Image (cartoon, helix red, strand yellow):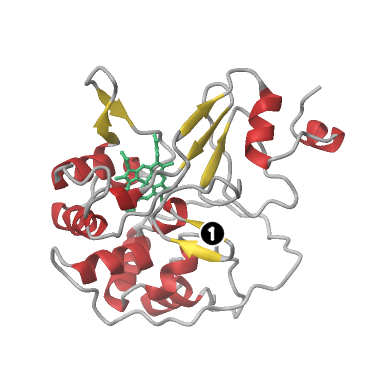
Amino acid sequence: MGSWTEDEIVEVLRTARRKDGRVLFTFPPHSFYNHMALEDARSLARYLKSLPPIRNPIQPRTLPFEPQPMVADGPARAPQGRTRERATYLMGALVGCRECHSHHENGTLVEFAGGSPSDPFQGSFRLGPDLPLRQLEKGFAAFPYPGFAVLYGSNLTVLGHGGALERVPTERIVRAIRQGIDVREDEYGRPRPIAHVMMWQFYKDMADVDALALADYLKTLTPVANPVGVRLKLFGTDWEAAFQQTYGEPPTPEDRAAFGMP
Ligand code: HEC
């Protein structure tokens, strides 16, 4: 991007429109960068321009449709401090928590209540050595994990206001976000690690003020009961059982072929 100006990079980040007029195919988190503050997009552009060039010609993409540009509607400067406005900005424009921690029930978004028990494509993750996306799938990618497993995003509405984990101190939530340690101990009182799917390895350098703003925000959510009790279901080597749990139906011969299963 050495030949791009900072403004041109800001434009592609916030609208998906390249300087040659082509429009990028966006997916989360790109798809919400149109809400990014101008100042933050400028910082990113400046950083990108500071990188030493590496020659790596990328194959032209092939898409069955033409993507549409986005409308940049972020503020000039992002809200600052340990505030609700800051948390809303971070989640909406940069880090994305809603995407993994919410699900749809009868067409309505149930925010931050974790994975859906009835829709395996919403807020759940299929984990396994080789669980590629199925053709009709509209959910998330699969993540490597020893053995076959299905992991549900946790219910974040139970951390305050009469929720099951109301007494959890804010620092514990911050620790979960940045260090990947569950707010709850295991049954023997030992710290419990959070799966890598949760993006804590990227959030680890998040500033105190930002992590605290997010934790404060989560504590204000109205508790929503979510019958997904178990967050992680392990299936060992039983691929068929993992498939059934994930997709709600047994695998067809085509599925077997797609997943490389005999
Ligand atoms: C890529 C998906 C993804 C994103 C993005 C994500 N999370 Fe998570 N998060 C998960 C999953 C999956 C778990 C459960 C992991 C487990 O059970 O080991 C989790 C667990 C958590 C927990 C621990 C909850 C508990 O009960 O111990 C907290 C807190 C949390 N996430 C907060 C956040 C916040 C705040 C953000 C945004 C800054 C965020 N997450 C973004 C997937 C995600």
Direction from residue 58 to residue 222 in the image, left or right: left
Which residue occupies 19% across, 59% down? 213
Q: Whole-percent x and y of residue 71?
A: 48, 82
Q: Which of 217 and 207 is in front in this view?
A: 217
Q: Give the percent coordinates (x, y) of residue 86.
A: 22, 68
**In this view, 129 is above or below 17:** above
What residue is shown at x 26% (from left), y 56% (from top)? 218
Looking at the picture, tell me which residue is in the foreground, 176 or 14. 176
SS for callout 1: strand
Amino acid type at circle 1 is His
Closer to us: 95 or 236:
236
Residue 43 seen in render: no
Q: Is residue 65 shown to the viewer in this render?
A: yes
**The quarter of the displayed image where residue 92 is located:** bottom left
Residue in view at x 74 percent, y 52 percent: 136
Residue under label 1, please give it: 104
Q: Is residue 250 left or right of residue 100?
A: right
- Image vertical order of residue 43 relative to residue 262, above or below: below
Q: For residue 93, which quarter of the picture?
A: bottom left
Judged from the image, the quadrant occupied by ligand 1 is top left
